[in-house]
Image: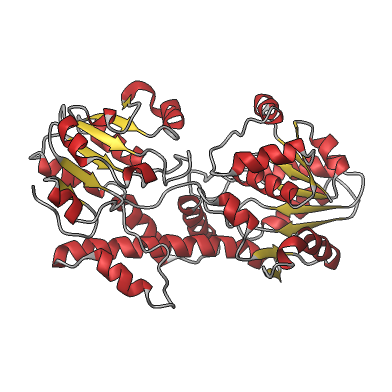
Amino acid sequence: MNITIVGTGYVGLVTGTTLAELGNSVYCVDIDEKKVEGMKSGVVPIYEPNLEEMFLRNIQSERLFFTTNLKEALDKSEVIYLALPTPPGEDGSADLSYVLKVANDIGEMMTEYKVIVNKSTVPVGTADKVREAISSKTDIPFDVVSNPEFLREGFAVEDSMNPSRVVVGASSDKAKDIMAKIYQPFTNTGIPIIFMDEKSSELTKYAANSFLAVKITFMNEIANYCEKVGADVDKVRLGMGSDDRIGHRFLFPGIGYGGSCFPKDVKALIKSGKQEDFNFQILEATENVNTTQKVILVSEIEKYFDGNLAGKKIALWGLAFKANTDDIREASSLDNIALLLKKGAKIVAYDTIAETNVQKILGDSIQYAKGMYDALEDADALLIATEWPEFKNPNFELMAKRMKNKVIFDGRNMYPLEIPEQNGFYYKSIGRKTILK
């Protein structure tokens, strides 16, 4: 089947590459000419494990194409996926201007039946708005479908090729048949495709992400309580997760959630609720707790240095919001950097994958180290903000030689407590006892 993907951001590029891998001819459209030329030359514009191999394979197999010409791609395809940004506005609502602009363009350009697939995360009722935008420009028949993605950054290729389910919101039998054909390679292997109405499909994505944000935040609350009463959150987490009604996933405490999905989707669902005179009280609490949790270790760092961080050199391991991605949107590292700089500290950060994206925002307000141990040179303390694998088993002897003080503030609970204790480090993590050197 010929398929067009409008937007080559994280969702669009992974979706387009996956659909090409399933044997379709996929035309990816983006307005950024430089980006399009780079992709034509085999340059993957985002970091995602295992994506480049699949990307290059499908370009070489002539199943994956890139263009800035929407009309050209539209004419070649029966199915058009909208994978466009829906950034939060100042009031938290999702900005649909990109989606509706392209919908208008499609209405003006289309010459025959198309299925328009909303892949972007959008509020309930967006399919109706897209339908209205297109129908205001044409009398040619078309269908609008909601098909939310459930990709985890860092595992997107795995998730896209082996999804737990495919959710499709469609009211047209013709559109359902076309979507079933696209995803037949999945359903043939037992992966379910769940058909529902468009509004339920749109809400499913928001509900899923918001629930996971609540789960993470609840565990962070438990972790903070553990410190008050002398319990160990790692043991509590294992005990809770062993209940199959709860499960082990998303029970790891830390310095809050970030990224392109959870913060944005929680805000958007809260705002959508208010528009219907409904208050998502649990989500409002989740958002408030997460804001505080992201910088919870700064007060601990300040306390360790007797309330004075002026001139203190803090080494920071990790800038991405999570491991295995270069995404820094809503990253806890940025909140910590901002607050530490405000208090007079100096920051030397290490994250080779996300460094470039941070430099675009922070410039030379912080320093960037070439290696994880280089960041530690004469550091007064180390703050760990991202759980990159290379941080999991460091050389503590080398760390001790490089650092001015053997002090670690671990926002991701990277080490069993006995490891820093055996190496003579002061070690403060989340929801566990503090190791005093």
Q: Quadrant of residue 201?
A: bottom right
Determine whether, in the image, residue 86 is placed left or right of residue 256: right
Q: In percent of the image, x 14 and y 54: which residue is there?
A: 434
Q: Quadrant of residue 177?
A: bottom right
User: Can the viewer see residue 314 in this picture?
Assistant: yes
Front residue (pair 260, 317) = 317
Picture layout, residue 12 above or below residue 244: above
Picture layout, residue 126 above or below residue 353: below
Residue 219 at what x, y percent from top left?
33, 64
Q: Quadrant of residue 123?
A: bottom right
Residue 37 at what x, y percent from top left?
70, 25
Front residue (pair 53, 214) = 53
Q: In percent of the image, x 80 and y 38: which residue is there?
A: 62
User: Can the viewer see residue 97 in this picture?
Assistant: no
Residue 19 at what x, y percent from top left?
73, 50
Number of marks: 0
Q: Which residue is farthest top?
A: 364
Residue 221 at what x, y percent from top left?
28, 63
How has the structure been colored for display?
secondary structure
Front residue (pair 61, 36) = 61
Determine whether, in the image, residue 410 is placed left or right of residue 245: left
Q: In percent of the image, x 72 and y 67: which residue is there?
A: 187
